């Protein structure tokens, strides 16, 4: 299937959202992702395809891809994406993913590392739209004060008193002390972790070591990024 680029938006410095209109109807669950193919020459050793979360909520009716562009030499894929003009198309397939919310009545802790916020935007926007409970504490760790979706998240928090946001800026990190300080009863919530692969791995191991049951931990790994 093809998606047509209809708009783009700079979220913060070096992070952009690309808004696409699917050429055929596409329905997805908040938190799912797509496989993108962008043919280009020359293609570096990372190839011409990538996975990206659909950062738009289903009710928004369009697909959104939000990504970070590196200051260093980026991949040829990202270079092609960055130069994609409005009206151009991108090929997608394999809508997948179970990083979705099952029961909004339950308590949740969402842990985002930088651009790992993308599935949480989709999930939170959809819950807010559907007027479903948002029993979520978001621990959002970022390299600096340039927070992607800051205004949108804080807007949702204004009308959902059980949605709490804590920012953790580098060089501070999310560790056992921080989790115990911000989450009063760690056995109760379901933990969702999303971000660069090494961070998600480390935090999963940390939570298990803290005695959190495996069925209370859900992880979404973004390969290709170093630790935030
Ligand atoms: C299920 C899933 C969902 C995802 N969702 C998102 C999402 O919503 N947003 C998002 O941004 N990413 C997401 N990703 C990750 C995405 O697919 C890319 O892996 C990631 O964005 C890195 O992109 P890139 O490889 O083009 O590298 P770049 O972003 O261009 O660079 C990242 C780092 O790799 C280095 N690098 C770049 N090219 C090379 C090279 N050829 N060889 C060695 N090092 C290189 C750069 O210097 C930089 O340090 C997701 C991945 C999965 C599996």
Image (cartoon, helix red, strand yellow):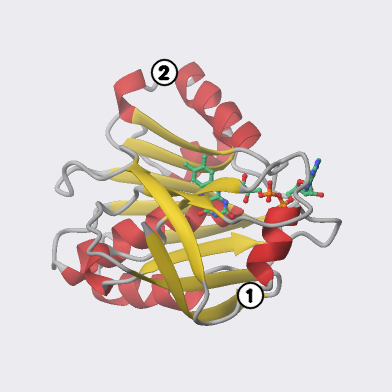
Mark closest to the chain's N terminus, 2 or 1: 1
Q: Determine whether, in the image, residue 10 is placed left or right of residue 130.
A: right
User: Residue 143 shows which numbered tag?
Assistant: none
| x, y percent for residue 191 | 37, 37
Task: Give me the residue at 75% from left, 52% from top.
Answer: 75
Q: Is residue 191 above or below residue 167?
A: above
In which quadrant will I find the N terminus? bottom left
Q: Determine whether, in the image, residue 153 is placed left or right of residue 115.
A: left
Task: Give me the residue at 41% from left, 61% from top.
Answer: 55
Q: Determine whether, in the image, residue 131 is placed left or right of residue 171.
A: left
Residue picked out by circle 2: 211
| x, y percent for residue 166 | 49, 58
Q: Is residue 6 above or below residue 174?
A: below
Task: Give me the residue at 28% from left, 44% from top.
Answer: 100
Residue, far right: 72
Marks 2/1: CA–CA distance: 37 Å
Which one is nearer the viewer's eye here, 117 or 72?
72
Q: Residues within 10 Å of mark 2 (few under 14, many from 20)?
A: few
Q: Secondary structure at mark 1?
A: strand
Task: Give me the residue at 70% from left, 69% from top.
Answer: 14
Q: Residues within 10 Å of mark 1 (few under 14, many from 20)?
A: some
Answer yes or no: is residue 116 visible. Answer: yes
| x, y percent for residue 163 | 31, 61
Answer yes or no: is residue 163 visible. Answer: no
Residue picked out by circle 1: 12
């Amino acid at each position: 299937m093809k998606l047509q680029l209809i708009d783009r938006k700079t979220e913060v410095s070096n992070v952009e959202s690309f808004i696409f209109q699917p050429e055929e109807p596409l329905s997805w669950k908040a938190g799912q992702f797509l496989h993108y193919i962008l043919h280009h020459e020359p293609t570096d050793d990372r190839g011409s395809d990538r996975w990206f979360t659909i950062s738009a909520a289903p009710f928004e009716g369009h697909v959104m891809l939000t990504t970070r562009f590196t200051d260093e030499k980026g991949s040829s894929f990202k270079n092609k994406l960055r130069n994609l003009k409005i009206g151009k198309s991108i090929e997608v397939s394999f809508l997948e993913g179970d990083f979705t919310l099952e029961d909004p009545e339950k308590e949740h802790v969402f842990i985002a590392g930088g651009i790992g916020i993308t599935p949480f935007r989709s999930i939170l926007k959809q819950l807010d739209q559907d007027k479903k409970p948002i029993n979520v504490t978001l621990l959002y760790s970022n390299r600096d004060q340039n927070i992607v979706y800051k205004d949108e998240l804080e807007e949702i928090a204004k009308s959902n008193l059980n949605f709490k946001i804590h920012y953790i800026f580098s060089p501070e990190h999310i560790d056992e002390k921080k989790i115990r300080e911000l989450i009063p009863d760690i056995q109760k919530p379901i933990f969702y972790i999303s971000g660069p692969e090494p961070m998600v791995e480390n935090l999963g191991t940390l939570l298990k070591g803290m005695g959190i049951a495996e069925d209370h931990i859900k992880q979404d790994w973004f390969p290709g990024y170093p630790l935030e």
